[in-house]
Amino acid sequence: MHSRTDTIQSSAEALRYPWENHPGPDQVVEVMPGVLWVRLKLPFRLNHVNIYLLADGEGWTMVDSGFGNEESIAAWTALFEGPLAHIKVTRLIVTHSHPDHVGLAGWIVERFSCPLHMSQVEYLQSVYHQNRGTEERRNAQRLFFRRHGMDENLTDKLLGRGQDYLKRVSILPPSYRRISHGDEISIGTRRFKVITGGGHALDQVMLYCAADKLFLSADQVLSKISPNVSVWAVEPGSIWPHWRASPPRCPMTSSCCPATACRFTD
Ligand SMILES: [Zn+2]
């Protein structure tokens, strides 16, 4: 009988990583027909985010937009003038409100005049983040951090970092189209089921195509690392029940495309 450790090891060994190298900043990789993979740099320890483009009739659906800084805009501009010159983005789906995903939504929507699709909670969370920099909110966060034992110096650093959200996102489009858990959407010839999960974000969108066993997992299921699950001052109760509630929604899959390197299972 296998021990728990054996089970975990054998599960990990079952994963295959079909690409030895990730795409460089000026490159695009075709994951499967009609699914393109782009990787943009991030100025964090987690140093990249994966973006996927799905063939969608005459156009393409982009899943996530990248971090809202000048370097990402320069990277996209080079790609749209280079290997993606033939691409017209006709729909943008943003999985959640973190700045490496929603950061350039406004820029992409304006460049291609395409609609933005998000879950209602994640869109409203983005609106909240863009407008939360009031003194009252900063004081509430300061009290929350100090109550949990954080020293003054680290509290100041974290509060300063949190306000950077406004510098990391382009202006959010003033309207969006709602996608919800359980929706079925057509993207080109593929049918995707919309799955949402809590824990890492409030209502993060994932897409699953059963016919191709293709799962775009965003930050909910990552490769080699576990997602960040944080408790914030605005909701100081435990967030774990939300996280525990979400994994059973994830489908069994043979091809998983997370926000870090692509992974395959046997
Ligand atoms: Zn995230």
Image: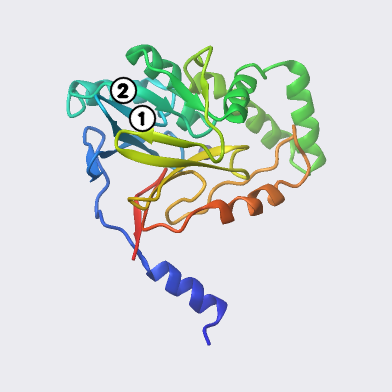
**Residue drawn where x is 43% and y is 33% of the image:** 43
**Which of the numbered marks, if any, corresponds to residue 45?**
none
Quarter of the figure with the C terminus: bottom left
| 44 up-or-down from 16: above or below | above
Q: Secondary structure at mark 1?
A: strand
From the top left corner, tell me how far across and down residue 104 is, in percent: 42, 22
Query: What's the colour scheme?
Result: rainbow
Q: Secondary structure at mark 2?
A: strand
Of residues 91 and 131, which is closer to you in this image?
Answer: 91
Q: Does label 1 or label 2 sit earlier along the sequence?
A: 1
Residue contact at pointers 1 and 2, CB within 8 angstroms? yes
Quadrant of the rendered structure where residue 121 is? top right
Mark 1 residue type: Met
Q: Is residue 105 left or right of residue 127?
A: left
**Residue drawn where x is 42% and y is 18% of the image:** 115
Of residues 214 and 72, which is closer to you in this image?
Answer: 214
| 172 up-or-down from 43: above or below | above
The residue singled out by tag 1 in the image is 62
**Residue drawn where x is 62% and y is 26% of the image:** 125
From the top left corner, tell me how far across and down residue 63 is, in percent: 39, 33
From the top left corner, tell me how far across and down residue 77 is, in percent: 27, 20
From the top left corner, tell me how far across and down residue 3 is, in percent: 55, 82
Of residues 262 and 138, which is closer to you in this image?
Answer: 262
| 197 up-or-down from 42: above or below | below
Q: Is residue 27 left or right of residue 65?
A: left
**Residue drawn where x is 25% and y is 53% of the image:** 19
The residue singled out by tag 2 in the image is 89
- Beta carbon of the mark 1 residue lies under 8 A of ligand 1: no
Q: Residues within 10 Å of mark 1 (few under 14, many from 20)?
A: many
Mark 2 residue type: Val
